[in-house]
Amino acid sequence: MENNNEYNYNLLENYLEENKTKKNHFKIFINKVLISLIIMIVSLIFIKISDKNKEYFKKYVFNTTFNFTSFNNFYEKYFGSIFHKDDTKMVFSENIDYSVNEKYLDGIKVNAVNQNISAIQGGIVIFKGNKGGYNNTIIVQGSDGFDIWYGNLENINVSIYDYIDEGTIIGNCLENLYLVITKDNKYYSYEEYKEI
Protein backbone atom coordinates (compact mmCIF):
# COMPACT_ATOMS: atom_id res chain seq x y z
CA MET A 1 0.00 0.00 0.00
CA GLU A 2 2.81 2.38 0.91
CA ASN A 3 4.64 1.62 -2.39
CA ASN A 4 1.44 2.33 -4.31
CA ASN A 5 1.08 5.75 -2.63
CA GLU A 6 4.71 6.57 -3.37
CA TYR A 7 4.20 5.53 -7.01
CA ASN A 8 1.08 7.75 -7.29
CA TYR A 9 2.95 10.63 -5.68
CA ASN A 10 5.80 10.26 -8.23
CA LEU A 11 3.30 10.16 -11.10
CA LEU A 12 1.62 13.31 -9.82
CA GLU A 13 4.98 15.04 -9.39
CA ASN A 14 6.03 14.12 -12.96
CA TYR A 15 2.69 15.34 -14.32
CA LEU A 16 3.01 18.69 -12.53
CA GLU A 17 6.61 19.11 -13.74
CA GLU A 18 5.56 18.43 -17.37
CA ASN A 19 2.72 20.99 -17.09
CA LYS A 20 5.12 23.55 -15.64
CA THR A 21 7.51 23.01 -18.58
CA LYS A 22 4.66 23.33 -21.11
CA LYS A 23 3.49 26.56 -19.46
CA ASN A 24 7.04 27.95 -19.57
CA HIS A 25 7.32 27.16 -23.30
CA PHE A 26 3.96 28.82 -23.90
CA LYS A 27 5.02 31.94 -21.94
CA ILE A 28 8.27 32.16 -23.92
CA PHE A 29 6.33 31.86 -27.19
CA ILE A 30 3.86 34.59 -26.14
CA ASN A 31 6.76 36.85 -25.08
CA LYS A 32 8.42 36.42 -28.48
CA VAL A 33 5.17 37.25 -30.29
CA LEU A 34 4.61 40.35 -28.11
CA ILE A 35 8.19 41.56 -28.65
CA SER A 36 7.82 41.10 -32.41
CA LEU A 37 4.54 43.07 -32.35
CA ILE A 38 6.15 45.87 -30.33
CA ILE A 39 9.04 46.10 -32.83
CA MET A 40 6.57 46.23 -35.71
CA ILE A 41 4.39 48.89 -34.05
CA VAL A 42 7.41 51.05 -33.17
CA SER A 43 8.61 50.75 -36.80
CA LEU A 44 5.19 51.79 -38.12
CA ILE A 45 5.02 54.78 -35.76
CA PHE A 46 8.57 55.77 -36.78
CA ILE A 47 7.58 55.70 -40.46
CA LYS A 48 4.34 57.62 -39.89
CA ILE A 49 5.99 60.52 -38.00
CA SER A 50 7.61 62.13 -41.05
CA ASP A 51 8.57 61.65 -44.67
CA LYS A 52 12.24 61.91 -43.66
CA ASN A 53 11.83 58.87 -41.39
CA LYS A 54 10.02 57.06 -44.20
CA GLU A 55 12.92 57.68 -46.61
CA TYR A 56 15.46 56.63 -43.95
CA PHE A 57 13.50 53.42 -43.32
CA LYS A 58 13.29 52.67 -47.07
CA LYS A 59 17.00 53.30 -47.53
CA TYR A 60 18.20 51.08 -44.68
CA VAL A 61 15.50 48.42 -44.57
CA PHE A 62 14.33 47.92 -48.15
CA ASN A 63 17.40 48.91 -50.17
CA THR A 64 20.18 47.15 -48.27
CA THR A 65 20.97 43.50 -47.80
CA PHE A 66 19.63 42.24 -44.50
CA ASN A 67 22.12 40.22 -42.48
CA PHE A 68 20.04 37.39 -40.99
CA THR A 69 22.94 36.05 -38.98
CA SER A 70 23.63 39.31 -37.14
CA PHE A 71 19.94 39.71 -36.35
CA ASN A 72 19.73 36.07 -35.21
CA ASN A 73 22.77 36.49 -32.92
CA PHE A 74 21.28 39.67 -31.40
CA TYR A 75 17.84 38.09 -30.97
CA GLU A 76 19.26 34.86 -29.52
CA LYS A 77 21.33 36.83 -27.00
CA TYR A 78 18.30 38.63 -25.56
CA PHE A 79 15.25 36.50 -26.39
CA GLY A 80 16.37 32.96 -27.29
CA SER A 81 16.47 31.19 -30.62
CA ILE A 82 14.14 32.24 -33.44
CA PHE A 83 14.83 29.16 -35.50
CA HIS A 84 14.00 25.58 -34.76
CA LYS A 85 17.27 23.69 -34.88
CA ASP A 86 16.59 20.31 -36.45
CA ASP A 87 18.66 17.74 -34.59
CA THR A 88 17.61 14.99 -37.00
CA LYS A 89 19.65 16.23 -39.98
CA MET A 90 22.57 14.01 -40.93
CA VAL A 91 26.00 15.44 -40.21
CA PHE A 92 29.30 14.02 -41.41
CA SER A 93 32.62 15.03 -42.86
CA GLU A 94 32.85 14.48 -46.62
CA ASN A 95 36.20 13.91 -48.32
CA ILE A 96 35.85 16.49 -51.09
CA ASP A 97 39.15 18.18 -51.92
CA TYR A 98 38.12 21.83 -52.35
CA SER A 99 41.71 22.88 -53.05
CA VAL A 100 41.64 20.99 -56.39
CA ASN A 101 39.38 23.26 -58.40
CA GLU A 102 39.08 25.51 -61.41
CA LYS A 103 37.61 29.01 -61.76
CA TYR A 104 33.89 29.15 -62.55
CA LEU A 105 32.01 32.48 -62.80
CA ASP A 106 32.44 34.20 -59.38
CA GLY A 107 33.61 31.05 -57.62
CA ILE A 108 35.10 27.65 -58.31
CA LYS A 109 34.10 24.34 -59.85
CA VAL A 110 34.98 21.29 -57.73
CA ASN A 111 34.92 17.67 -58.85
CA ALA A 112 32.21 16.09 -56.68
CA VAL A 113 30.72 13.42 -58.93
CA ASN A 114 28.07 11.34 -57.11
CA GLN A 115 29.01 12.77 -53.71
CA ASN A 116 26.97 14.03 -50.78
CA ILE A 117 27.67 17.70 -50.14
CA SER A 118 28.01 18.87 -46.56
CA ALA A 119 28.07 22.46 -45.33
CA ILE A 120 31.61 23.79 -44.79
CA GLN A 121 30.22 26.22 -42.19
CA GLY A 122 27.12 26.43 -40.02
CA GLY A 123 24.54 29.15 -40.54
CA ILE A 124 21.13 30.04 -41.90
CA VAL A 125 19.87 28.99 -45.34
CA ILE A 126 18.95 32.34 -46.94
CA PHE A 127 18.36 31.12 -50.51
CA LYS A 128 17.16 27.93 -52.15
CA GLY A 129 16.45 27.88 -55.85
CA ASN A 130 17.85 28.21 -59.33
CA LYS A 131 20.60 30.81 -59.65
CA GLY A 132 21.73 31.82 -63.16
CA GLY A 133 24.68 29.69 -64.22
CA TYR A 134 24.79 27.78 -60.92
CA ASN A 135 21.61 25.70 -61.36
CA ASN A 136 19.98 24.45 -58.11
CA THR A 137 21.68 26.51 -55.42
CA ILE A 138 21.69 26.81 -51.65
CA ILE A 139 23.15 29.92 -49.98
CA VAL A 140 24.17 29.61 -46.34
CA GLN A 141 24.90 32.78 -44.37
CA GLY A 142 27.36 31.98 -41.59
CA SER A 143 27.81 33.67 -38.25
CA ASP A 144 31.12 35.01 -39.55
CA GLY A 145 29.22 37.07 -42.18
CA PHE A 146 30.31 34.95 -45.16
CA ASP A 147 27.73 33.70 -47.64
CA ILE A 148 28.60 30.34 -49.17
CA TRP A 149 26.82 29.28 -52.33
CA TYR A 150 26.56 25.58 -53.14
CA GLY A 151 25.49 25.25 -56.78
CA ASN A 152 24.55 22.41 -59.12
CA LEU A 153 22.94 20.36 -56.32
CA GLU A 154 20.44 17.52 -56.53
CA ASN A 155 18.15 16.09 -53.81
CA ILE A 156 18.42 19.16 -51.58
CA ASN A 157 17.85 18.26 -47.91
CA VAL A 158 17.37 21.73 -46.39
CA SER A 159 14.69 24.41 -46.54
CA ILE A 160 14.97 28.16 -46.61
CA TYR A 161 15.56 29.67 -43.14
CA ASP A 162 16.76 26.35 -41.72
CA TYR A 163 19.61 26.69 -39.26
CA ILE A 164 22.25 24.12 -40.14
CA ASP A 165 25.47 23.03 -38.49
CA GLU A 166 28.84 22.59 -40.15
CA GLY A 167 28.87 19.14 -41.75
CA THR A 168 25.11 18.97 -42.35
CA ILE A 169 24.34 17.18 -45.62
CA ILE A 170 22.61 19.77 -47.80
CA GLY A 171 22.22 17.66 -50.93
CA ASN A 172 24.24 15.67 -53.42
CA CYS A 173 26.03 16.37 -56.65
CA LEU A 174 25.90 14.27 -59.80
CA GLU A 175 28.63 16.21 -61.59
CA ASN A 176 30.61 19.27 -60.49
CA LEU A 177 29.88 21.39 -57.43
CA TYR A 178 29.90 25.16 -57.96
CA LEU A 179 31.14 26.90 -54.81
CA VAL A 180 31.05 30.67 -54.26
CA ILE A 181 32.32 32.34 -51.08
CA THR A 182 31.43 36.01 -50.63
CA LYS A 183 31.29 38.71 -47.99
CA ASP A 184 30.42 42.41 -48.43
CA ASN A 185 30.27 41.98 -52.24
CA LYS A 186 33.83 40.61 -52.36
CA TYR A 187 34.55 37.09 -53.60
CA TYR A 188 37.08 34.79 -51.95
CA SER A 189 38.83 31.61 -53.01
CA TYR A 190 38.44 28.58 -50.81
CA GLU A 191 42.05 28.94 -49.62
CA GLU A 192 41.55 32.64 -48.72
CA TYR A 193 38.40 31.77 -46.79
CA LYS A 194 40.15 29.04 -44.80
CA GLU A 195 42.98 31.43 -43.84
CA ILE A 196 40.60 34.06 -42.43
Image (spheres, rainbow, N blue to C red):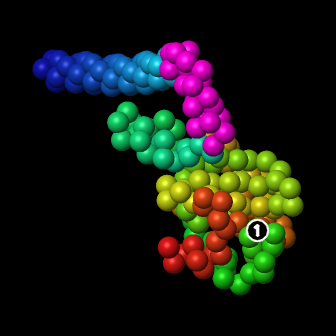
Left/right placement of residue 57 relative to residue 157 reads left
Q: Position of residue 67 (x, y in %)?
A: 56, 46
Q: Position of residue 182 (x, y in %)?
A: 64, 63
Q: Quadrant of the N terminus?
A: top left
**Helix, strand or loop for disc 1:** loop
Q: Nearer the viewer, residue 112 or 142?
A: 142
Prevalent SS, magenta region: helix
Q: Nearer the viewer, residue 21 or 193?
A: 193
Residue pictured at 81% horizontal, 69% vertical: 105
Residue pictured at 57% horizontal, 25% vertical: 52
Q: Which residues are magenta?
A: 45-64
Q: Position of residue 20 (x, y in %)?
A: 30, 21
- Does 30 appear above or below 96? above
Would residue 185 be seen by someone viewing this image from the given angle? Answer: yes
Q: Which residue is mark 1?
A: 106
Q: Nearer the viewer, residue 178 or 89?
A: 178
Q: Position of residue 138 (x, y in %)?
A: 71, 54
Residue pictured at 39% horizontal, 21% vertical: 31
Left/right placement of residue 18 relative to residue 109 reads left
* In magenta stretch: residue 63: yes
Question: Farthest residue in the bottom direction?
Answer: 100
Q: Quadrant of residue 148?
A: bottom right
> How would you rate the neighbour count of disc 1 (Cα within 10 Å): few for under 14, some for 14-19, many for 20 or more?
some
- Does 28 appear above or below 128? above
- The kind of residue on which mark 1 rests is Asp
Residue pictured at 67% horizontal, 42% vertical: 160
How many discs mark residues in the rendered view?
1
* In magenta stretch: residue 60: yes
